[in-house]
Image: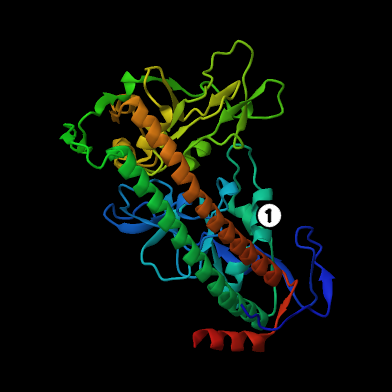
Amino acid sequence: MKNPKLTKYVNYKDSEIEWIGKVPSNWEVKRLKEISEINKRSLSEKTPASYEFNYIDIGSVAYGEKGFTTERMNFKEAPSRAKRIVKKGDIIISTVRTYLKAITSIDEDVSDLICSTGFAVISPNKGVFNKYYSYFITSDIFVNEICAQSKGVSYPATNSSVIGDLFCLIPPYTEQKAIADYLDVQLIQIDRKIDLLTQKAKHYNKLKLSLIDETVMQGFDKNAIFKDCGIDWIGDIPNHWKIKRLKELGFLYSGLSGKKGEDFTDEHKYSSNFIPFVNIANNQFISTNDMKKVVIYPNEKQNKVSKNDLFFLMSSENHNDIGKSALLKEELPNTYLNSFCRGFRITKKGIDPNFINYLLTSQKYRNRISVEGKGFTRINLKIEKLNDLILIIPPYSEQKAISDYLDIKTAQINLIVKTIHSQISKLKELRKNIINDVVTGKIKVAEEGVKNERTALSR
């Protein structure tokens, strides 16, 4: 990747803003509210119930990812927070759960676009080059300051007034445009590489899921005689396999109960480990490196986890995570479980927990469990739906052979995917560094070099 000519500015001055530091001497420093309007448009309470729009919620925006996803809905059925009107050129900044860093710019015309009141909608004033401010506001230096200004531990949040008081750097207009043009060119090239690697990782993950699906649903014997198991969504299974309900294999137990926000701390003498929601959501096998702390007093009645326990997500913001399972392969003394989850302990002999976990990972089972989740703003799974889940059970020797085989094969694929994600992470880090260095004036972009680079890229 060739860069247009980059140099240092001749003179710098102290911005007198600790988190910004020195800036080019011809740049100004102003508060965000001085160069933009914040939350200028909202839906009125008189909006027709039938009005349909594209809704952006906090979960629709991912930090470091360009763009956003939307959900089509009408005003009557929409959550009460679906109020802020968004237009092309706006920048939306999450004011709740700020650790998610849900910030993005609206670069395209999308009709009837509404976002949650959990966002501050920034509309740059005339005379400000929008694309430059989009890059500045989504840069690490600015995003980290938003997080630093947030209040709260378990649910950090800020507000539009605090965000409006944050400082922005203002280069001369021609430099704003040169910076934005330079970043457009550089990031297109980086994003192309990221997209190609992302597609490659998706291909390997699909390959892994196909391998799991075929093996846990059919076994190894290609000459096996199959039978109709009597369950439409499962279909035919090997003749000698059985079916059992989950509750016939063991019992479900609850996660943490009766805990308050102040109990979740690592600074108390009775702080103990617990398995957080994300450890189950993000992993097939529980990661011992991803634990949180909670206060558990002596003689307090809470359920401890054990080796070979399965864990299920019983409440989630989307259908993709609901009912997701993960297996604990190691013994973890004095460890507990997140309150939005359920543990399952196998007590029946002849059952391999690892096989059951692979079975629950298969697409047929994920689809089945997902449709049982109910709710709108939050999806919940009833205990009885999980207890009554039909499982296909091969003889123990086959269960073990299948899970051992999948351990080896999926580990090989996971290693490939891990390498790809490492390459993606390096590119994303490069992307962030380029943005930070340019929008803060650490390096100067030569305007003529940008024009030449853009011309070369368009050929």
Is 64 positioned to the left or the right of 6 in the image? left
Considering the numbered disc 1 on the image, is that residue within a helix, a strand or a loop?
A: helix
Q: Is residue 130 visible?
A: no
Residue ID for mark 1: 145
In the displayed structure, would residue 98 be above or below residue 246?
below
Q: Residue at x 32, y 24 (%)?
A: 246
Q: Outermost residue, top direction?
A: 299
Q: Is residue 319 visible?
A: yes
Q: Residue at x 59, y 45 (%)?
A: 157
Amino acid residing under circle 1? Glu
Q: 408 or 278: which is nearer to us? A: 408
Q: Quadrant of the N terminus?
A: bottom right
Is 150 positioned to the left or the right of 51 in the image? right
Q: Residue at x 31, y 26 (%)?
A: 395
In the displayed structure, would residue 375 be above or below residue 308?
below
Q: 390 or 6: which is nearer to us? A: 390
Q: Residue at x 73, y 68 (%)?
A: 29
Classed neighbour count for the residue bearing mark 1: other residues with Cα under 10 Å, few (<14), some (14–19), many (≥20): some
